[in-house]
Image: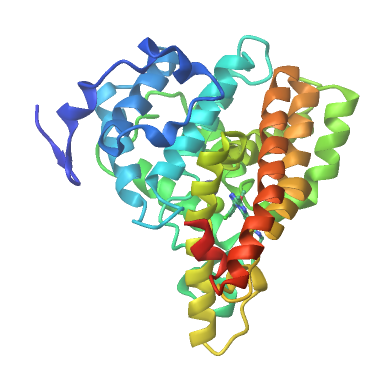
Amino acid sequence: YHMKVGNQDVVDVIMCPNPHDEPCFEKFTFTPRKILPKETPCYVLQMMHHLNFLEDFRIKQETLIRFILYVKKGYRELPYHNWLHAFSVAHFAYLCLRNFQLIERGYLTKLEALAYFVSCLCHDIDHRGTTNSFQQQSNSVLASLYSSEGSVMERHHLSQTLCILNTEGCNFLESLNREDYRRCLDLIKDMILATDLATHYKIHSRQLTMAEEGYDRTSSEHRYYLCGLLMTCADLSDQTKDWTETKRVAQLIYSEFFNQGDLEKQMGKEPANMMDREKASIPDHQVEFLTECCLCIFRILAVIFPSAKILVGAIKRNIICWKSSKDTFNKLCLEGKTSYEVLI
Ligand SMILES: COc1ccc(Cl)c(-c2nnc3c(C)nc4ccc(C(=O)NCC(C)C)cc4n23)c1
Ligand SMILES: [Mg+2]
Ligand SMILES: [Zn+2]
């Protein structure tokens, strides 16, 4: 049957190469951004088949496909916070589920695993390429809706996700019993809200304590902290890939940051240095972000899952590359290039 959603026909989604034929698809070194955008919905479906979600939760394939296509359509054409970011975050979740055996070893229940994968896919829906503080500064509609609770953008991503689930023919969770359905929506809420970096900074020390004490499967706090950690790691997973990928992703992120800085200047506001294309020193800021934020988070992950050590190693390599790129950056900036021009 043919149902048009956006510019992709449902039938296309089913017919695509089987990613599992490519062994490295299952490895942390695989870079999901190299997959053709038009093939990504099919890969999402394949990953969910491989995680056995359709069988475990009696999910109708055609409903799931419609949901995936609506989620993809929900992302804007932005340099970074677009569908390909969501797809790469969901792919990292898939890698964690498979490589850390999160279900088999009881870290996550099957329902938590489903919520984790779906939350990654939906965690930035309808992003505008601007930060939570920019929502406040610009008195955006979203700020008026959500600023009293905080995590403005994340609450919007959650609300967009629930709207799609309530769209005719898109509720792939419909065969869950009432209790599982309610639990799954609560998990999706916790997980999407956990992607607010400010929330991560608040609970980071307790996540470290949890890792050092040893994960307690009976503790609801531990389960919440683990979900938050897995979401933030997935959101930052571009930083665990090779240098070429990391450099290209940084260029996309700063393209969004500098666009926001331009908007702030037009509003008569002084942008933060990292948002100001005239003042930002990308290598310095990236060394700081990777060292202060990414390295810490993935070190906690590696305490719980020792095989995640390779991800910590990849981040360390990228930090070294940013440090060595500083000389090149400074030399070229002396020749009058902005740090962004050096990056592209
Ligand atoms: C987990 O949630 C998010 C949300 C948004 C973004 Cl862009 C990212 C993210 N993903 N990759 C990166 C890289 C390579 N560098 C970054 C440098 C600064 C910031 C940042 O948000 N600084 C705080 C200030 C804006 C208040 C985020 C960065 N980032 C992660
Ligand atoms: Mg986000
Ligand atoms: Zn994100």
Ligand 1 quadrant? bottom right
Q: Along the horizontal axis of the image, is 63 left or right of 327?
A: left
Q: Which residue: 42% across, 46% down?
A: 161
Q: Position of residue 137 (x, y in %)?
A: 58, 79
Rendered image quadrant of residue 164: top left
Q: Position of residue 293 (x, y in %)?
A: 74, 47
Q: Quadrant of residue 219?
A: top right
Does the image show residue 191?
A: yes
Residue 5 occupies which quadrant of the picture? top left
202 and 77: which is toward the camera: 77
Q: Is residue 218 above or below residue 142?
A: above
Position above or below: 112 against 282? above
Q: Residue at x 70, y 18 (%)?
A: 307
Identified at 61% across, 38% down, the residue is: 231
Q: Nearer the viewer, residue 39 or 221?
A: 39
Please tell me which residue lies in front, 172 or 343: 343
Give the vertical position of 320 relative to 95 (above or below). Answer: below
Above or below, 232 against 19 in this view is below
Tell how many labels. Answer: 0
Residue 300: where, in percent of width, then height?
Answer: 78, 32
Horizontal side of residue 344 vs 146, given as left or right: left
Residue 236 is situated, as x and y percent measured from the top left of the image, at 60, 42
Q: Quadrant of the N terminus?
A: top left
